[in-house]
Amino acid sequence: MKLYYITAEGHREMHIEVVADNAALGRVAADRILRSYDDGRLQVLGVATGGTPASTYRELAARSAGRLHDIRLAALDEYVGLPANHPGSYTTFVRQHIAEPLGIAPGQVGVPRAEAADLAAAAAGFEQQLRDNGGVDLQILGIGSNGHIGFNEPGSAADSRTRAVTLAERTRQDNARFFDSVDDVPREALTQGIGTILEARSILLLASGARKAQALARAVEQPPTADCPASWLQRHPDVLVVADEAAAAALSRRPLAARGA
Ligand code: PGA
């Protein structure tokens, strides 16, 4: 099912595709990515980590037949306090789930250098690398149960840039499943900012599972606010949301303009 929302600020359409489950989400997202590549519009792919996009990366690996090997990958964020080769780091995730299966060389992969002693310099260096590579063509995003994108937790401003942040307690609880215990989840991260993310030419927001339903409804149906960082995406001209039925459960499914919002 395809939904079209006129955003709360009234001047943008957001397209939402609702599919049955996470496997279907992976197929639709991979279609979008491969189409972009085949049309010659994908040189830099912005990649999200976590549970939601794993099916997308599996689909890409199965269907791309090696043809994505020449793209660059740019990660959204990395934990502070984990060595880059730690099994729970996002550097490891991007290598294992995306770069290696797609045949992309390590030199083509950019992850914020959260191991650096000077995090402000690492953040500035990451932004410079994005610019040097011509910016992100297509950015894949997940959404946190608290509405975060990347590690931009509630309170993140629309013009925020790559920076060190403190993780919300809810995020640490949500991500505890990737660690032995919640005590092992880092407390800080280096993340692309909202302003950085909004510079991607095109955005693909993926939402899967009942845990995301309230955050997704807020993100697309309420006026943009720092309380729900994903709602800033309403300001971007080219966003496709792919949500499974569980994540879409709280959507009104009526275009906001029709409600007079
Ligand atoms: P998840 O994370 O896909 O593991 O639920 C999403 C996010 O926090 O962005």
Image: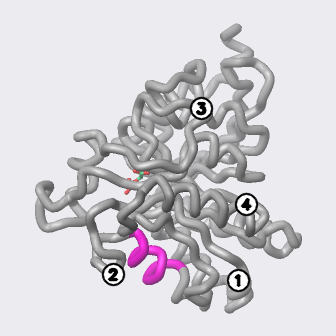
Q: On the image, numbered disc 3 is attached to which residue?
A: 158
- Vertical order, 5 against 18 (above or below): above
The answer for how far apart the CA atoms under marks 1 and 3 are is: 31 Å
Name the residue that disc number 1 marks: 68
Distance from mark 2 CB to nearest ligand 1 atom below 8 Å: no
At mark 2, the secondary structure is loop
Q: Return the x and y of residue 137 as percentages of the image width and height.
A: 75, 61
Q: Disc 3, ligand 1: is the CB inside 8 Å? A: no
- Compared across the picture, whether 173 is left or right of 189 comes to left
Give how far apart the Cα atoms at labels 2 and 3 are: 32 Å
Q: Residues within 10 Å of mark 1 (few under 14, many from 20)?
A: many
Label 3 crowding class (10 Å Cα cut-off): few <14, some 14-19, many 20+?
many
Viewer-side residue, 4 vs 46: 46
Q: Nearer the viewer, mark 1 or mark 2?
A: 2
What is the spatial separation of the Cα atoms under label 1 and label 2, in whole angstroms? 24 Å
For residue 131, which numbered disc appears in the image? 4
